[in-house]
Amino acid sequence: MDNEISTQPHGMEDVEIQEWLESLDSVLESSGPEVAAEILERLRAHATVNGIDLPFTANTPYANTIPPRLEPLFPGDQELERRIKSLIRWNALAMVVRANRVEHNIGGHISTYASAATLYEVGFNHFFRARSEEFEGDTVYFQGHASPGMYARAFLEGRISAQKLENFRRELKPGGGLSSYPHPWLMPDFWEFPTVSMGLSPLMAIYQARFNRYLEDRGLKPVTGAKVWAFLGDGETDEPESLGAITLASREKLDNLIFVINCNLQRLDGPVRGNGQIIQELESAFRGARWNVVKVLWGSEWDPIFERDTEGLLVKRMGELVDGEYQKLVVSSGAYVREHFFGSDPRLLKLVEPMSDESLRRLRLGGHDPRKVYAAYKAAVEHKGSPTVILARTIKGYGLGEAGEGKNVTHQQKKLNEDELREFRSRFGIPLNDEDCIEVPFYRPPDDSIEIQYLRARREGLGGYVPKRSVRTKPLAADHDELFKEFHEGSDGREVSTTMAFVGMLRKMLKDPEIGKLVVPIVPDEARTFGMESLFRTAGIYSSVGQKYEPVDVNTLLYYKEAKDGQILEEGITEAGSMGSFIAAGSAYATHGINTIPFFIYYSMFGFQRIADFIWAAADMRTRGFMLGGTAGRTTLSGEGLQHQDGNSQILALPVPNIKAYDPAFAYEIAVIIQDGIRRMYKDGENVFYYITVMNEPYAMPPMPGNVKDGILRGMYLFRPAANGNAQLRAQLFGSGAILNEALRAQEILETKYGVAADVWSVTSYKELYNDGIETERWNRLHPGEKPRVPYVSKCLSDAPGVLVAASDYLKTLPNMVSKWMPRRLASLGTDGFGRSEGRASLRDFFEVDSRFITLATLHELFVDGKLERAVLDKAIKDLGINPEKPNPIIS
Ligand SMILES: Cc1ncc(C[n+]2csc(CCOP(=O)(O)OP(=O)(O)O)c2C)c(N)n1
Ligand SMILES: [Mg+2]
């Protein structure tokens, strides 16, 4: 075990060790901890120089970080706080038990909050400062499964009715209910941060704390000393995202950030590290990442035993046990503890000789001792220069006794029998008699009781209630017509990609008097790919320490400029981290009352495909802003191959209800979408956000035809009608993104070679068309007596003659989704399958989405309709150079 104090080697005498320890004690007493630490450091260096190979350890012993003599006085009324906490415990339990009595298997969690109650209550009574007129407030990420505790507290505070508690997990009941977990989407006045998908909130909290600094360094908000608290489970830390960004927090010296890890040593199925020690493992990870680590392992009852132990035997013994053993010990009898823990050494037994079995059983863990927790929190909020993590030891299902305390099944425990309820009631002193108690009623003392008075006074002292979400920002004023007008005009024949066009817009937005300072460009080490390097100099890359070096390219125009007031968040290679920044910036309208507008641009394949759950969290959180999937389109990105070519993201955006997904072809389409997006989100306050795919294929950007804005936003518009509308053979071609150009080329081939007159539509958003279609269908179903409404797609195509062919750089299912609202059969071309390392032309041939295949699909549809001779089709296949036996991209 890392933290073991090594056993005495080579027969070294106890007395010698004793002398060393005593002399350290005397230095500590006479000169203080700093001098003692200095001596130890010098000793270590001396030992190394003399060839002593000291094993590396980032661990400290299995003991509390803060010794009793450095503990501050507890400022509250401990007994009253205990009573309040007991009431919250009861109501939290009652919510879950009652809900499951009414509706079998409705679920809910008792044991998570039971283990964390003290950790939260010390925070609520003494630390979490609310948002108020005077102070921006602390930010708290509550562990998702502990939600019953937060509801139960809000019930005592008078913020949530008993009716709502009754409807925990039954949100559709009359009068409303409470959502299972923290979901701002469902409870927008209460929850701020969705935390229940484990591992997301630690990372989001880190980027939130960093974004708070960014806002301060850029002068967008005053420096306030507000803290970001994140409460996590110890099992949760196995999610790679949980620890994935911790070095950013220390590198950025985020002393505004505090993690509290509830180390109950258990997760859902069993122990987190039955054969190891999760606390020591986490300590070394965080210390290695240069966090301030505060361990709160043992309660005050242990202090006198430690004091009696002048030989360091107790701490040595504590380091020996694995978590599986600890899990058993903490719920065992005093006699068992004496025999199995202290019994390993007669000297240890002697330490506890004067103690009864009962007092051994009552030895509390640190995370259940408000004094120890208070000391840790105080140390954390006062700590300077690095983030703090508090590793607090607790018991899962604390207080549940036989119903599950410390048991492996405790996570799932939702029902208690009568005896178990009575026992819980008695243990926590809830004033309910034996009969009433088995009904598990909610219990709230009257408003004028000292408990409620105290609880309210504490919250008033801290500025109000937490959690509480409110939108405090003012809507933007301007329309920004001028800003975007230039992009309606086309590129005058100059070939540019939609990515370049977007970057041009971004550059212009950054200079705008109203929104310029609010724009937050975010990029995960891909700015050069998107041609954004010109922004390095003009907008600057945010760095909390400025630029301590002369950049190697300082003599060039576009040098890598880092600055304390830099505007770009250049996140390095972390799409998850970038999404953390996107969420922080896109929710600042609520968290800070600031309308920051994030533009997060990234390699599109590494967005929805890689970090979809963060996007889901962003949606839940009502995040606003623009995500831009760069180098998008399976066949548009040449060379990169199977991993990079994105034909998926427009599909993967479908399940996120409030994201608007667009696949625009031209600069003016992007301009219209962004301008409207800013209006909807930042002027009208809509809870939507945007996903826009942008491509790297250069072509001339046409000027905007008249009257198409509405169509661009709704998902489709007629871009180029057929030259000869009276032709016999007619077709409608639907193209999106860069593939629109293939449809336009097909239009020409069809007209000149086959006499087919085709209209070409730009489909900017199949998702918008789909949503409109299903919405219309639904309305018609529910209102059979009224005049049926017509889906937008049907309206567009009501008079459109001929066969229908769609092509996009995404899966064929995208156009197919809306085909049922089209007047006739649709032929869909798309890019289902793995990509290839190839040039664009070959890729479009391989995936069968180029102008030749669009032409062929059109002719084939006409043939099926009996409008074209088979011979024409056969000849076309030859003339177009199509190999009918080519491999099928879906399975090759
Ligand atoms: C990403 C993710 N995977 C799985 C779950 C399901 N789940 C909910 S709670 C839980 C165990 C939690 O253990 P821990 O983090 O130690 O928290 P505790 O309840 O012990 O405080 C699991 C696996 C989840 N919510 N999120
Ligand atoms: Mg746990």
Image (cartoon, rainbow, N blue to C red):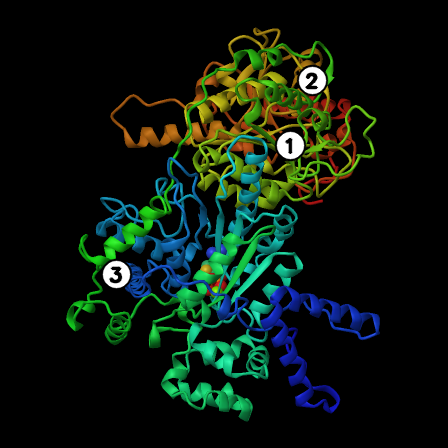
Q: Residue furthest bottom?
A: 346
Q: Which class describes the residues within 10 Å of circle 2: few (<14), some (14-19), or many (20+)?
A: some
Q: Element under label 1?
A: loop
Q: Are marks 2 and 1 in contact (CB under 8 Å)?
A: no
Q: Residue 855, relative to residue 346: is it above or below?
A: above
Q: Residue 419, relative to residue 715: is it above or below?
A: below
Tell me the quarter of the image containing the N terminus.
bottom right
Residue 465: % across, % down: 34, 46
Residue 743: % across, % down: 65, 20
Foreground label between 3 and 1: 1
Q: Is residue 444 visible?
A: no
Residue that badge 2 annotates: 745
Q: Which class describes the residues within 10 Å of circle 3: few (<14), some (14-19), or many (20+)?
A: many
Q: Label 2 is placed on what type of residue?
A: Arg
Q: Element under label 2?
A: helix
**Quadrant of the rendered image containing residue 439:** bottom left
Q: Which class describes the residues within 10 Å of circle 1: few (<14), some (14-19), or many (20+)?
A: many
* Disc 3 to disc 2, C-alpha distance: 66 Å
* Disc 3 to disc 1, C-alpha distance: 51 Å
Q: Is residue 663 left or right of residue 123?
A: right
Residue 437: % across, % down: 20, 68
Residue that badge 3 annotates: 98
Q: Label 3 is placed on what type of residue?
A: Arg
Identify the residue at horizontal 58%, vertical 45% (top origin): 611
